[in-house]
Image: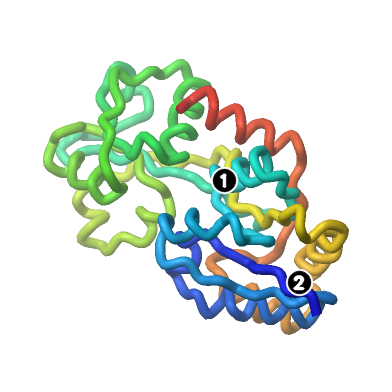
Amino acid sequence: MTKFTFMVCPHDTARGPEAWYRMAQYLTQHLEFDVHFELSLDFQDFHAQLDSADIVYANPTDTLKLIDQRGFVPQVKPKGLCDELVFVANTEIANPTLEALQGEKIATVRSLLPSNIALYLLKQRSIEPAELLDRESWMSVIRSVWQGEANYGIVYKDTYDELSDQGKGMVNAFFTSDEKVAFHSFVCGPNVGAKCDNLENALLVMDSDDTGKEVLSELHHISSWTRITPEELDLMRHIIKEYS
């Protein structure tokens, strides 16, 4: 039986790689080829191994790189689940609003997509920050706002949601985006060829059988899959290019 290597964004496997092993087993049982899950220790390891990947569940930026630079084919995305961000403020600021960000310094991780989405969101509202203070991690953003290095910050929503109560108490979360413009995706490599259609179909009907539902229930907030449109990919490209 033909074997294809399956890799998953480390952000998702950090919550429990066992669920993705089960996903690979499920796909193998429902397809005419073997899906071998290759676990990555971190993003450095993930990117180093991508050349050997045939099927990838990738974050938005890696999704577009695989499609545009390596000829991967977009398959499906989680239905109703997108990458979003949380705006946070120093706890001493009373009643913070998006409008208060006009001309302000904002702490963020400049190289990561939530920053692009935030600038896109603010541009739609004619709000222009004075400066983005680049930090090395989302936790560094939290600390910068807590210590008053910046009155405001941008934090990836998944990271904020996973903070302890103590961590959340360091800042005042005052606005959560709902832009629905970026998402993780299954993409299928050129080596898979015509079998990409079989993979897409298997994913789309996962929620219609008991075993598929059980596998999905172990993944983080994923209840079903839906197709990706060219327009959705074009908007994601625009946000990455224009707001970088």
Q: Nearer the viewer, residue 168 or 111?
A: 111
The answer to whether residue 171 is above or below residue 132 is: below
Q: Position of residue 109 (x, y in %)?
A: 33, 39
**Residue drawn at the location 61% of the way across and 47% of the way down:** 63
Task: Give the quadrant of the C terminus.
Answer: top left
Q: Find residue 22 and name its label.
A: none
Query: Which quadrant would residue 98 be assigned to in this image?
Result: top left
Image check: 28 left or right of 104?
A: right
User: Mark 2: which amino acid?
Assistant: Met
Q: Find residue 206 and name its label.
A: 2
Task: Give the quadrant of the N terminus.
Answer: bottom right
The answer to whether residue 189 is above or below residue 25 is: above
Query: Which quadrant would residue 111 be assigned to in this image?
Result: top left
Q: Position of residue 83 (x, y in %)?
A: 52, 47
Image check: 41 left or right of 105?
A: right
**Residue drawn at the location 35% of the way across and 53% of the way down:** 160
Q: Position of residue 9 (x, y in %)?
A: 52, 59
Q: Which residue is mark 1?
A: 60
